[in-house]
Amino acid sequence: MKYSTLTATFAASAIAMSTAAFAEVEVQWWHAMGGANGERVDKIAGDFNASQSEYKIMPVYKGNYTETMTAAIASFRAKQHPHIVQVFEVGTATMMSAKGAIYPMEQLMKDAGEPFDKSDYLPAVISYYQTPEGELLSMPFNSSTPVLWYNADALKAAGVDVPETWEDVKSVSKALVGNGMKCGLSFGWQSWVMIENFSAWHDIEMGTKENGFAGFDTEFTFNNDHVVARMDDIASMSADGSFVYAGRRGDSLPSFTNGECGMWINSSAYYGSMTSQAKFDFAQTMLPLDTNVASAPQNSIIGGATLWALAGHEDEEYKGVAKFMTYLSSPEVQAWWHQETGYVPITTAAYELSKEQGFYETNPGTDTAIQQLSLNTPTPNSRGVRFGNFVQVRDVINEEMEAIWAGSKTAQEGLDEAVSRGNELLRKFERSVK
């Protein structure tokens, strides 16, 4: 009896030791994807975990983009930080300035011995997150760009064509309202859409020092005549409902999907919401061109977020991070993510796979975002933006643009104040990183 008990004890210990020896290395991933996209993130992590037995990705939803970045910074100070954190594009300068906190993704892949070729990635996507020397800081994941969504049924009923220019947008909006719609045009994420992307699309700078890429001692210049004129014109469209402002971020989505508004400018990543909510024939097209500013468009810039690796973990854990980044970037995963969400595929191979699978033939226009981003080689004005304290700056821009829409300030007054207040935040950031 004693012998059997002793034998059983040794056997149990051996099993426990064996299990420990082959325990999966856990990798924490904090993200900002809620709802259906959160479920998709869980699927990606789960599929990776099922594909091998060495590493286990642990996705954790931490709130919206701002909340997730704030939580990551606080956790790093407390030395309880995750291995991977999802940070939106306007947090890039903040992450770069967090000395000792980040593990540059390109260096991580090299140190882990994981094959990595930057030429596999779409230039317009990857360039946003590189140092001036070309080193990739974070891994693109959910990248999008604004497009012009339109209610094809409503345009047909009003007898108008899909707009290509801002003059077209204005006339189509009037026709839609004249045909009974409550709103012709609305948009969301207005700093991103109407300041950052309007400027890039027309190859005009938003700020000095190559929009901040060439140094944090940059100053805003988006109160120029071109942007002021565009804001003035849009504000004038409010008089008859041709333009209706309905909130920041994606607040105005329901006004489009419920059929109240005929056109909506916002992220290509609302594709999943469109397919589940809109009960009409909808489509997307390229951003309108202001022919008073340019004769042809340059390229749009991305939004969304990337995955940053935080420093201070074990080498074996970073090998798991590297393996997961390779998996995440694979054509199959990226094509699936792109087709499910409307985010652009981050690699050329994923784009080609989506073509081969016939996705763009059966869903016309869903490659609009890719075409916009790849329209021309990015210039210093259209590569993107890299401004310090830009989360707060966007709040300032929102406040001033809302004053313009409300009629309490002219476009020139509002944009002048946004630039002045924004420059104060730039100087504050610059002092903090010296």
Image (spheres, helix red, strand yellow):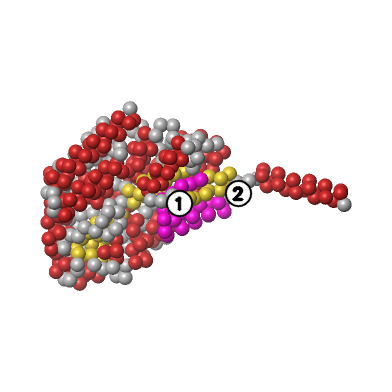
For the point 17% across and 71% down, the residue is 180
Q: Quadrant of the C terminus?
A: top left
Query: Does residue 32 show up magenta in the picture?
Result: yes
Mark 1 or 2: the one toward you: 1
Whether residue 86 is situated above or below residue 149 in the rendered picture: above
From the viewer's perspective, is 361 left or right of 205? right
For the point 20% across and 50% down, the residue is 401
Amino acid type of the residue tagged 1 in the rendering: Tyr
Q: Is residue 341 visible?
A: yes
Stretch of the chain drawn in magenta: 28-51
**Where, by quadrant of the figure, is residue 135 drawn?**
top left
The residue identified by callout 2 is 53
Q: Earlier in the sequence, mark 1 or mark 2?
A: 2
Whether residue 133 is situated above or below residue 243 in the rendered picture: above
- Estimate the x, y position of residue 136 in percent, counting from the top left: 40, 38
What secondary structure is marked by label 1? strand
- Estimate the x, y position of residue 287 in percent, counting from the top left: 23, 54
Amino acid type of the residue tagged 2 in the rendering: Ser
For the point 12% across and 49% down, the residue is 410
Out of 18 and 65, give the one closest to the viewer: 65
Whether residue 109 is situated above or below residue 201 in the rendered picture: above
The residue identified by callout 1 is 61
